[in-house]
Each structure stands twice: as structure tokens, then as C-alpha cells.
Amino acid sequence: MITFIPTPIGNPQDITIRAMKLFESATLFLCEDTRQTKRLLRLLEERFDMTYPDAEFYSFNEHNGQERLDEFGETFNDKEVVYVSDAGMPVISDPGQLLVAYAQENDLKYDVLPGASAVTTAYAASGFEEGKFLFYAFLPHKGKERASALAEAMNNGYNTVLYESPHRLEKLLDEVETIDENRELFLAKEISKKYQNYYRGTAKSLNAQLKELTIRGEWV
């Protein structure tokens, strides 16, 4: 059995009781980053009296995912396998898709738990009226690919959700303002964390506002 378990995107209290019970019974963890997962498990053990699992831990990411499947994928039926990303919902902008496909192709039983998601949390907080949106995750970093992807995102006829790193956020706002300075934007900073903040306005006004700030943390 393979279980895909969402983890908190900021506040540890957003973990579910079901997730912690499955963590305790797991025999194999596949993690985007084993160090991050072990830190979370120790924190849960300390704050919520969860028993730290007696399990094996292996990284599973875009660089070694296929190698891991070739190495011990055939043993999954005999183990309680848990897959977690560093934060949030597995498989969403995350290498876990390869594991889902493997389970489907090999008739392995799997489950996906509901839980924390930066995409849906940010969209709910935006207040945008249109219920439909498209999720683009991260844009390409530079060049024609980035320009093309941004143009597509801004002209698809739907609200669009993007992730962006703090050191490229100012560049993104400059690009959006150049294309359409009156485009209505919503920015969510550090969702569920101590310094969470929301910003809504036109591309021009938000760009000016954020140039006065030190841009750190995670943004949607």
C-alpha cells in the first residue's frame, strides 16, 4: 500500500490525525528530502505525542525517482509505504507523479489523503469572483520559454495561479506590469506562517508597494 500524505505548508498544527497515525505505522518513507521529513516527524513527536516511526527513509525526487522504482518498487506490496513532499499536497508541483503512475501501471493499491495546499488556500484568500482557475506552478526561469509561458498564463481567459521564488518575484511583477499594468493581482506570502500576509491590487500598484519591502519567504 502506498499512501500519499500532505504535510503542513507552514503551521505544524495543520497536520491531520489520520496522517500522524499513518506515519506511525509506515515501514518505508519516500521523501522529496529525507532531512526535511525527519525534522517534521520529530516535531510532531514532540508536540503531539506521536511515536516516531521505525521505518526506512529514502529520497524520491526528480533526479532519482526512476532509479528508486527500479531498485525496490517490486517490494511495495509487502510494505506500508508513505510518500511526502517537503510541504503541502504531494504530486502538485512535486515529483510524486512518477510514483502514482507506477502504482497505476502495476496495479498497486494506493491512497491520497486530503490536506494542506498552497494553491487552493491562496485562491480562496484571493476573493476573485471567477471560480475557475489554471495552475502553472513555476514559470521557466528565463528566456523565450519564460516570456511565452507568462504570455499564455495572462491570456488564457482564466484566473491563473503561479508559484515564484522570492528572488524572482520582483522580476515577475515587472514583467506583468509591462504587459498589463492594470491586471488585478493577488499575492499570498508565507501562508499559515508567522509572517503571513496578503496583497491585492493592480500590477502597477503592487509592484510599487513591494519595491518598498524586503522580499523573503514563499509566495503564491
Image (cartoon, rainbow, N blue to C red):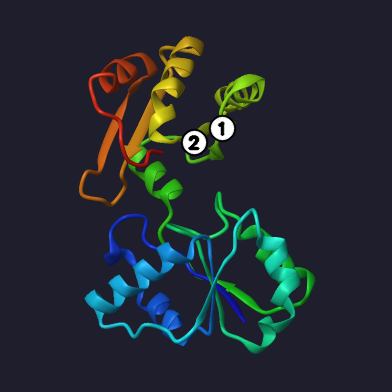
- The residue that disc 1 covers is 139
Dot 2: element? strand
Quadrant location, the C terminus: top left
Q: Residue 2 appears at what percent x and percent y?
A: 60, 76
Discs 1, 2 touching: Cβ within 8 Å: yes
From the viewer's perspective, tell me whether residue 61 is left or right of residue 45: right
Instruction: Specify the amino acid type for callout 2.
Output: Leu
From the viewer's perspective, tell me whether residue 147 is left or right of residue 48: right
Closer to the camera, 142 or 103? 142
Residue 72's quadrant in the figure? bottom right
- The residue that disc 2 covers is 162
The image shows residue 178, relative to residue 68, as above or below, that is above
Closer to the camera, 202 or 118? 118
Point 35% across, 78% down: residue: 17
Point 31% across, 47% down: residue: 191
Instruction: Specify the amino acid type for callout 1.
Output: Leu
